[in-house]
Amino acid sequence: GQQVMQIPQYQHVQEGEDFTTYCNSSTTLSNIQWYKQRPGGHPVFLIQLVKSGEVKKQKRLTFQFGEAKKNSSLHITATQTTDVGTYFCAGLFGGNTPLVFGKGTRLSVIA
Amino acid sequence: DTAVSQTPKYLVTQMGNDKSIKCEQNLGHDTMYWYKQDSKKFLKIMFSYNNKELIINETVPNRFSPKSPDKAHLNLHINSLELGDSAVYFCASSPRLGTGSYEQYFGPGTRLTVT
């Protein structure tokens, strides 16, 4: 079946360091979404990317969608302890197919 | 007002029992989902309903039966619970398919523990 691969699985950073998580698909995506799940919480929608090469920013977070619409990344600049959680990408392959979630990247930030 | 709500939040039960989880959304969305998140945090879709109609049914044992009495509600009934059913179950909703806006809004989750 269609899969979205996400790496790394875990990332530990010192507060103030940058963080990046990557998602890849072997087939073209119609769009890609990113979610954040705090420990003990539920996934919360962050952003949706639709266009080839799209870049969107939300404060310290930068989201990119690859030119071929097969990969995406989330970059956090100068991490803070509030960034702790698991970040999921989720790809939509079109039609009535369900959103396919990556396995997530669990971010720990050491103060 | 809670956008997507689920009850109960916690459910502890013994193997072989039957249990239900309820979900309601007040966002006016047409599409609702059930996801299972295991101990490794993997999120896997189980079912999707669009305006009360089942549109996605992933490879889930038929002990799991969803029911959507109206487009604001999607319940999940589980028969003959097994140890492997222990997980967090999330309900989610999203705007109508085809609108171009597919972000999903998740409920707080139901942590099911089968002993």
Image: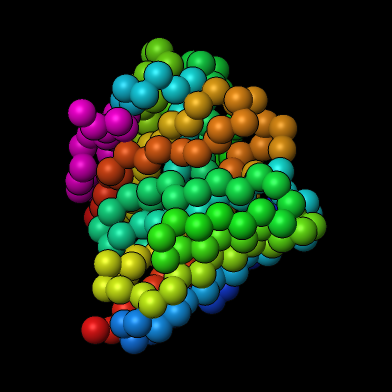
Residue drawn at x 33%, y 67% is: A83
Residue drawn at x 67%, y 37% is: A97
Quadrant of the snapshot with the C terminus of chain B: bottom left
Q: How many discs appear?
A: 0
Check residue B7 for magenta coloring.
yes
Q: Left or right: where does residue A9 sit relative to residue A78?
A: right
Q: Left or right: where does residue A89 sit relative to residue B41?
A: right
Which scheme is used to colour this image of the protein? rainbow
Residue A95 lies in quadrant: top right
**Can residue B84 be seen?**
no
Residue A67 lies in quadrant: bottom right
The x, y position of residue A20, in whole percent, is 52, 74
Judging depth in this view, the residue of A111 and B89 nearest the camera is A111
Check residue A77 for magenta coloring.
no
The x, y position of residue B73, in whole percent, is 36, 21
**A98 is higher (above) or lower (below) than A21:** above
**B70 is higher (above) or lower (below) than B35:** above
Magenta residue span: B1-23
Q: Left or right: where does residue B48 sit relative to residue A94?
A: left
- Furthest-top residue in view? B70
The x, y position of residue A103, in whole percent, is 52, 63
